[in-house]
Amino acid sequence: MNPFRYERATDPHSAITTLTASPHGAYLGGGTNLVDLMKLGVATPDLLVDVARLPYDRIVVRPDGGVNIGAAVKNSDLAAHRTIRTHYPVLSQALLSGASGQLRNLASTGGNLLQRTRCLYFQDVTKPCNKREPGSGCSAREGYHRNLAILGASEACIATHPSDMAVALAALDATVHVQGTGGERVIPLVDFHRLPGDAPQRDTVLQHGDLITSVEIPACPFGARSAYRKVRDRASYAFALVSVAAALDVMDGSVRDIRLALGGVAHKPWRATRAEAALRGAPATAESFGRAADEELAHAQPLAQNAFKVTLARNVIVRTLLDLAEVR
Amino acid sequence: MDVEITFSVNGAARRLSVDTRTTLLDALRERLGITGPKKGCDHGQCGACTILIDGRRANSCLALAVAHQGAELTTIEGLADGEHLHPLQAAFITHDAFQCGYCTPGQICSAAGMLREVEQGWPSHVTADLTAPAIVLDDDEIRERMSGNLCRCAAYANIVPAIAEVVRR
Amino acid sequence: MLAARSIGASIDRVDGPLKVTGAARYTFEQPVENVAYLAVLQSTIAKGRITAIDAAAARAMPGVVEVLTHENAVRIASDDDEALRVLQTDAVAYCGQVVAAVVAETPEVAVEAAARIAVRYDEQPHDVVLRADHPSLYKPPKVNPNFETDTHQGDVDRALADAPVSIDHTYVTPHYHNNPLEMHATIATWSDDGVTLYDTNQGPHGIRDDVAKAFGLQPERVRIISPYVGGGFGSKAFTHPHVILTVMAAKLAGRPVKYQLSRRQMFALVGYRTPTIQRVQLGAQNDGTLTAIAHDVIEQTSTIEEFAEQTAVATRMMYAAPNRRTTHRLARLDLPSPTIFRAPGECPGMFALECAIDELANELGIDPVELRMRNEPAVDPETKHPFSSRGLVACLRDGAQRFGWDERDPRPRERLDGRWLIGTGVAASTYPTRRRPSQALIRVDRDGHYAALIGASDIGTGTWTALRQIAADALEVPFERVELQIGDSALPKAPSAGGSMGLASWGTAICDAADKLRARLRDDFGGVVPADGLEAYGEAGENHFAKQYSMHAFGAQFAEVRVDVDTGEVRVPRLLGVFAVGRVVNAKTGRSQLLGGMTMGLSMALHEESILDARFGDYTNRDFAEYHIAVNADVGRIDVEWIDEQDPYVNPMGAKGIGEVGIVGTAAAIANAVYHATGIRIRELPVRLDKLIG
């Protein structure tokens, strides 16, 4: 690790001012990803501004059922929150399927969104990586990519975003509240993370110095009928090969409304808008679920080692939706 | 870059000057001689470094010491009550829930933290009904909740009944 | 055989209180005054030469005490162990090789300084991929530790051609890394008398002798202390370069130096299990009687050391057949040197053999348990020696009954429970029973308290307790009256823990010392211990019965698996191992050893694989996030039983080593169960969902 200065932020304004003025600085939340990357030499900030104790540690339930989640809220507290468990189980399940109990106690909402890919070449500073060093090449394309992207990738980068929480938030139409030098703005979560394109070094649309203050989930009348299904190699404590976050509103055997997002398949949580469009108004059957999944995955560009993810994603979409359709 | 920090370890206030890069794990082991928490990976991937930070289980290898000014830390050394072993410690011995013993302090601290989480009604990945008012800590729940603690000797088959015995008491 | 009073009992580990309270000190935790920290820089190429090293920036950093490169390293005296010659040359033989090291006041400064050393290389093309048609495959003179490379009996090819039923399949196992949870570590302190090491190893005397040779010292001037070891699984049996490096660094720095490998460094510097490509051919009559067995193995070693895993040796004694062949061929690759990893030979070899037997059973339409019993040899098929004891059939019978094997419908893909396909599988286990020469010392004081001293080691195996039980019974005194001292090269010379030979070797030496002590006490002192006590040395020599009998432990393993129809996820809700291992010295810790071995076998079957990127000659998944070992949630119900077995030939305790037999066969039982569940035969480990989906 390179040497760095440490400052504990006392208020958001001075934190933003300080970091904006320090081009090689970084915010420190729970540290579970940043400190890991600093040990690997992938992240080399010369200043850490600790924002973990800023007053963003509340979960506020709105009268209409929407929820505001402070950026500093711990993943474990968010997963255990009664309203989330009851009304947005997809989010609770997504969080509980991620990492370990110990890590969830340290990890923050904001940090979870900002965590970086677990692509093994990104994490290895001795290997070429366009995300770490633009122009150096993508080692994964011709190398090991079993766990990498099948959707939205580019020639430059096939990394996937590792967060489970973000997939559930994407399905729930969450928005990310950000403070920056220019003031406050609200970014739909589905637009928060980028596709790699030809600038894979940029994971999100944030500018340096922007501080996430909260994540807002709008009210969803059928949020209680939601689920997260994560498929991985081990029974626990492993990243997703493919995951599905879904909320389903079925009436008289027909899909009245649906939210569907995929994890483990792209540089960002993949909101399956094609599948959703195909399913609104369609019968809630395995057949239509399958056809909708096929439509969404028709644009997949699998590589030699991860082609199985297409079949896996299709099967898990169908299975998850069938399970939700049967639940009373 | 050295910074002065204070925190309490097992009830005793400790003050030291640390490199900002020093993790809680290294501060405990290398600076304070508290070697119960172990380094098995140093990247939050094995759980051998698990301690309680303000009563919650956490990986001390990813916690920068400077970021935990004022925290109350509990390590394995702080679980026994003088000569009396903590029930988890005693159960681990009778159930032979360890072999080489290297992951053991982390396992036990993690279990202690986990039991508190259960008392607070926190669900897990395997909890069928997220809305249930209380958690039934069966073997599958114990396995899932303890999966953040790797054991290469694979004493898992004994770790689970050791914890289950403490739960029953 | 020794009369058992403590032996066989279920006694809590005596080191338990120290381990559960965090008081047991592992190597890196031993307090040493004025100690400095070591960090290393590793090569980024797999083959070539260092053309320039610029350590100026590192040397200039505050807190840096010393920088070591091949330009200023201590010259290693011995040249017979190439793998230990660290920083002796500008040649790079594998990716990850240590090319420089830094000694500094703090670990943070050491690591940062090492990263600031600039190295330039003249890179050469490397060869890192093991292939069945590799052009440089050669026949090694022996396979580990000293077996014949090839064996032949009868005319295998003819018998295979003539057999009414035959199978011919190739099985592949990947690179595996031992990955004990405690990374290798050493603390070295020089004094006028020599050098003292705290070191994590499977036996202090082997390390002592290697360090002594490397630095031109008499062995008595080197002391190795290792009371508690955080697992080894073979990777801590031999001396690895970091030990020599740390001793060297302490010499150059003029003060004690401590070094612990990072987890990532573990993947290059402390060995691993070679991948294997194994062709197994079996020929049989229609009634299942084997007429031909051929097992041809391809595996690898490094360019600086020859290690030939004895992959096909179990095939030489498992089943009867008049026509037999086993062969081993090696490729020298530009990779680190492989080493022993729990049950070297038997572990990968029995995966192939036991899957092949299962495939043959399916071809024949004969139950796989029955097929094995039909080919039970009366004597060792190759040496023709009688077995000292062989309980395989009893284990198969007992296990089948406990597991409910009789109710099994043999047809694959017939059982579905909701979204889960269910299957069951069986495989045999075996591991040789051997021992090595050892010495021991027993003292008694006038209060009747005994101390047994021996350079044995406990790497999680339970030696602290089990060996004390043996001493107590050898002395015919209660367990509480004996103290055991192990884990120090100052103690009598003993072999390392490995090859499941630990207790057998150490226990035999202790029995001999006990006999001699009691004889002295009786004959010279009339049964009364003199005021200043009494002591006697003992030793375990060669086991002469080993020349007359074939000695092995056996077992039968049964697995039930569930495979998700939609995702291919595999779960193992039930595992059962029934073993024939002679006397189990400590029922509690013995059971744990077998459970641990079986769980490691499950991990091998479903999860573990070190993924090599051939372009770099480097493993990509050098951490616990992506080198998956089984987690708690992966393990369902797992039962261990052992049958009553008396074997007076193996050692005075009648105890066969059990540290390794547990991992042998588990992967095959699981793979066979997966076939039974899905109809899909997977011959290349690990069994993962992408091989089962769609």
Image (tube, helix red, strand yellow):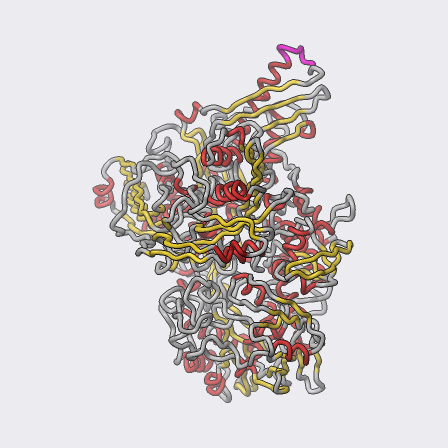
Left or right, C494 with respect to C612, comes to: right
Up/down of C39 relative to C540, above or below: below
Question: In the current view of this chain or complex, which residue is farthest to the bottom?
Answer: A281
Who's the residue at 66% across and 84% down the image? A66
Who's the residue at 64% across and 14% down the image? C521
Who's the residue at 71% across and 46% down the image? B90
Q: Quadrant of residue A33?
A: bottom right
Q: Position of residue C669 (x, y in %)?
A: 44, 50
Q: Position of residue A225 (x, y in %)?
A: 60, 79
Of residues C522 and B143, which is closer to you in this image?
Answer: C522
As for residue C527 lying within the magenta part, the answer is yes
Q: Position of residue A154 (x, y in %)?
A: 40, 77
Q: Quadrant of residue B47?
A: bottom right
Of residues C143 and C348, which is closer to you in this image?
Answer: C143
As for residue B161 lying within the magenta part, the answer is no
Instruction: Write the start and end of the magenta stretch as one range.
Output: C522-528
Q: Quadrant of the N terminus of chain C?
A: top right
Q: Quadrant of residue C479?
A: top right
